[in-house]
Amino acid sequence: MFYEKFKKWIAIAELALALVFAPILIAQGRKMIQVKGSDTMINLVQILAEEYMNANPKATPIAVLGGGSGTGITALINSTCDIADHSRDFNVKEFNQAWERGVKPRVFAIAVDGLSIVVNEKNPLNRLTMDQVGAIYRGDVKNWRAFGGPAMPISLYGRQSNSGTYTFLQEHVLKNKNYSPDVKEMNGNAQIIEGVLADEAGVGYVGVGYVVDKATGKPMKGLKVLDISKDEKSEATSPMDKEAVDTGKYPIARALWQSTNGKPGSDVAAFIQFELGPEGQKIVEREGFYPLGAKYNEANAKNLK
Amino acid sequence: MKTGTMKKAAVLAAFAILTASGLSAQTPTPPPQTFSTTIYFDYSFWATNNGYLTNTDPAVNINPLTNKFAFRRAYFTYENKISADLKFRFRLDADNTGRLTATSGTKDDRLVPFVKHIYLDWAGLLPNSSLKIGMTETLAFKTAEDRWGLRSVAKTLVDGYKDITGADIRASSADLGVNLTGAITKELRYGAMVMNGEGYSHPELNKYKKFGGFLQVVPIPGLNFWGYAEYEKLSDKPEAAKMVKADCYFDMIPGLNITGEWFKYNSDQKYNKVQQDDGTGTGTMISVNRHFDVSGFSIFSTYKIIPDTLAIFARYDGYQPDSTDSAKNLSLIIAGLDWAPIHSSWKIQPNVWIYNYKDSAKKSDVIVNVTFFLSF
């Protein structure tokens, strides 16, 4: 009788209790720092996270996912990650969305990358200009013979449009023109390397951290990293030349970024500080990327405050 | 040329052509294409037994479904990014309203897919803009739907109004026509549309079009004011359907969204229809010869406790389906959890719906649902 009379309110009370306590209990058990984004950065950030957790066993666990820079930035805007990895800047649309959703991105450079143009080692070419790389990827030039190479149709390997590297190359090398429809769109840097290794006529673009054989410190067997010059008159340099990347002589160098929504909380800030500190930067170098210079360190310190 | 040499040359030429075509066939030129599916269904049970909708008295309800599994929706979407500026979308939808009668004359309640979206989306007309041409989303409640983000649990106020109150308002989530949305600055966005007016479920029935537009102002990060108006002439007489809607979105605390929306709709008297009150909430629609406004408001909040894993939500809706008869007013409270125990492609969303009626003869209803959401 009593139950029948108050059945509705008992059900509501049960649900209210569940709504209040279940999230708290689950949240306590599952709190994690979520990092999402750039596929160029995923290996590096995974290793940084592992080493950070090894050094700080009581620290908040970190989950690192890829998906591309666009995916990471969208996740930050939608509050579904704590840190977005991105190898390009926010575009206007993303910046507007962030404003609309109350997200105030704080940006940290964690490493420097020399974006590498790679070919199969059987390709006799050693260098290209920025314009030539642009012409290749726009599809304006379709045969290696045009650059003094073998008479072979150029086989293009690239990334999907959610990749920051795709956008960076389009903006800085293709002069904002469209990619050739012949580009084979691969899921990540490692797949591009695999494609070029198996294809004598292949050309690809990847982060410098993916071209180095960690054991020898040289390019992977079967792969050639081309020297790139700004134009015909400039000196062509290699993305594996640290000084050339640092001084800007290598023309397609870029920073690899992480963004948080506003000032990072203490657990996120602790991880970023580790990445930017001597231990983190040593890992950056070990993984084939370049540590940060004074210019970036100053901006990072300001953003952490 | 000798016959043998000619034959050899022909064979070589044929081989060369075949090889070349084979090579070009091996050279993939795929535009980025995606296929995706979203499905949701409920297990629901009545927590009340004498409510307006949830009455277990055999005299009122011969076969009350006090608990049931109910399939709600399945979307199948194909998207093709043709170039940096041009996208194509094709979406099939199957919902629980699908009803067919088989050729044998027997009733067939299997889900029936229909075309919900089929449009081109071009970003090249104006800077930071999107021009959609075809059967596209309408502008009236898409922004609020994006904020709510829980269509698997409930539609937003205007979209779900007819389901809740029976009021016949001409507002559809998709329609055939053209719409343009974009941002002028980070503080100011706009949208304009010209549509058929019949929605996705009917062909055009008159020569008149539905015009709608919104302006959205974001003075500071996370604080949004959104205003919308639409107009549709319905016949050669001075008869038109009009709607105004105003929303406010508060997103200034990470993970927390609070939204308020209000709307008012009216059409001229010939088109005003009401649901006959047969005591079950499923009465037929009849025309009435009087003018009235339809209005409502909704306040909802979602909070992401663990990104991609756990969120909590609550909502309060007020419905005034007939401005000349306040006894028809009702309110609805919805609250629940959005939980992805393993992956965000599989969610469990326990939620409760509490209906309260202005008419004291109608007792409150409490329905508890466990919604299963799958996306892959």
Image: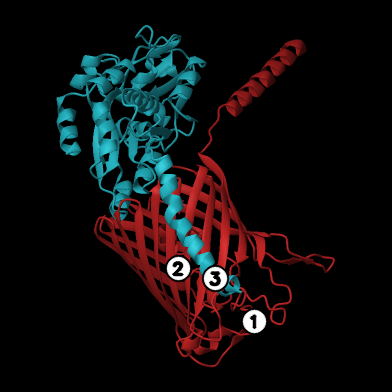
Chain colours: A cyan, B red
Q: Amino acid at mark 3?
A: Lys
- Callout 2 environment at 10 Å: few (<14), some (14 to 19), or many (20+)? many
Pointer 3 and pointer 2 on the same chain? no
Q: Residues within 10 Å of mark 1 (few under 14, many from 20)?
A: few
Determine whether label 3 and label 2 are within 8 Å by CB: no
Q: Position of residue A150 (x, y in %)?
A: 45, 12
Residue A261 lies left or right of residue B52; in this view the side is: left
Res A77 seen here: yes
Nearer the camera: disc 3 or disc 2:
3
Q: Amino acid at mark 1?
A: Thr
Q: In this rendering, which labeled residue sits more in front, label 1 or label 3?
A: 3
> Residue extending furthest front?
A2
Tell me the distance, in whole angstroms, between the alpha carbons under discs 1 and 3. Answer: 29 Å
- Which is nearer the eye, A251 or B277? B277
Q: What mark, if any, has residue A8 been given in the picture?
A: 3
Q: Going by the picture, which residue comes out furthest to the bottom? A: B289
The image quarter in which residue A126 lies: top left
State which chain disc 1 sits on: B
Tag shown at residue B194 = 2
Query: In the visual, does A103 lie left or right of B180?
Result: left
The image quadrant that residue B3 belongs to is top right
Residue at the image position 24 percent from the left and 41 percent from the top? A106
Marks 1 and 2 share the same chain = yes
Q: Is residue B94 above or below residue A153?
A: below
Residue bearing the label numbered 1: B284
Looking at the image, is B82 positioned above or below residue B248? above
Residue B220 is labelled as none
Label 3 SS: helix
Asked whether the residues under the numbered discs 1 and 3 touch, taking CB atoms below 8 Å apart as contact, a structural biologist would say no
Same-chain status of marks 1 and 3: no
Q: Chain of mark 3?
A: A
